[in-house]
Image: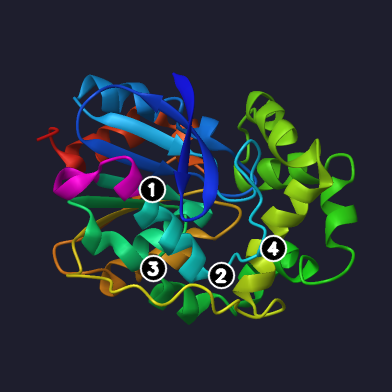
Amino acid sequence: MEIRTVHANGLEFACLTLGEGPLALCLHGFPDTAHTWRHLMPSLAERGYRAVAPFLRGYAPTEIPADGAYEDAALVADVLALRDELGGGADAVVVGHDWGAFPVYQCAGHFRRAVTLAVPPPGSLATTFLDYEQLRRSFYIFLFQTPLAEAAAASPGFLDSLWRDWSPGYDASHDLQFVRRSLLDDPANLKAAIGYYRAMLGTTPPSGRYPAVDPGARGPVLYLHGAQDGCLGPGLAKEAAAHLPEGSRAEVVPDAGHFLHLERPDEVNRLILDWLGPAS
């Protein structure tokens, strides 16, 4: 894989790239990096896609946005601008995990096919998020609204513990090396990543700089959730299909947690590639 820089939506995005053909845009989540797609990208390239995995806004080596905007509309604008700058066209497909899944739900109609992992559609999430057990899992979201957020997240072992709790039994030591370089070498990057959560609950009000995007025709989405997900419990996936566009599918992947594409790469790659079909 090579790394290249793409200017889109007013930011310089660093992207991992592999292969030639129609664009397959791969969006990571928190606390993670573009390297999370290291198993999927070669499979996409073999299938005839040009796999591109950007580091999301604020995640080094991508630029930190000067306006400090991390609301949904900014993320959607990033995705669509990246698609255009990378020459995606009508054949482009998109895959999003965790925070990378949020904008996919809002702009899936702008891609030929879409896949989301580990975060169910908003309608499904809203129905069970206030369950006590889920609130307990989501403690970090509320911690991130406070002035203690940056110090807590930077403390030794905090991010390691999130990975351990979210994907029990998975050795994340390799992944965490990438995460530390992206988020902990410069405190401004960690503040940026936490900014997503502050925008999520309105602690940071919307910037108003990014107008709502026409979602287009709601295309079908493949949704994948790990059966042992310790971040968003598998119960949240039960109603996912009912909140997805017609023709969509939801699958629970056994023996996998929140980072299911790293824990069960062969199975997850198969599901994704079967859904996307051959590059056209």
Disc 1 residue crowd, few under 14, some 14–19, many 20+, Cα 10 Å: many
Which residue is denoted by mark 2 in the rendering?
71
Q: CA distance from mark 3 to mark 4?
A: 21 Å
Say if mark 4 contacts mark 2, CB within 8 Å. Answer: no
Which of the two marks, 2 or 3, is nearer to us in this view? 2
Q: CA distance from mark 3 to mark 1?
A: 22 Å
* Residue placed most toward the observer, 75 or 174: 75
- Point out the stretch of residues depicted in magenta: 83-92
Amino acid on which disc 2 is placed: Glu
Which residue is denoted by mark 4 in the rendering?
195
Q: Quadrant of the N terminus?
A: top left
The secondary structure making up most of the magenta span is helix
Q: CA distance from mark 2 to mark 3?
A: 17 Å
Q: CA distance from mark 4 to mark 2?
A: 9 Å
The reply to whether residue 59 is visible in this rendering is yes
The verdict on residue 220 being magenta is no
Amino acid on which disc 1 is placed: Leu
Amino acid on which disc 4 is placed: Gly
Which of the two marks, 3 or 4, is nearer to us in this view? 4
Provide the secondary structure element on which disc 4 rests: helix
Q: Earlier in the sequence, mark 3 or mark 4?
A: 3
Q: Earlier in the sequence, mark 2 or mark 3?
A: 2
Which residue is denoted by mark 3 in the rendering?
121
Residue 20 horizontal/vertical position (percent) = 24, 23
Which residue is denoted by mark 1 in the rendering?
82
Residue 5 horizontal/vertical position (percent) = 49, 33
Q: CA distance from mark 2 to mark 1?
A: 17 Å
The verdict on residue 85 being magenta is yes
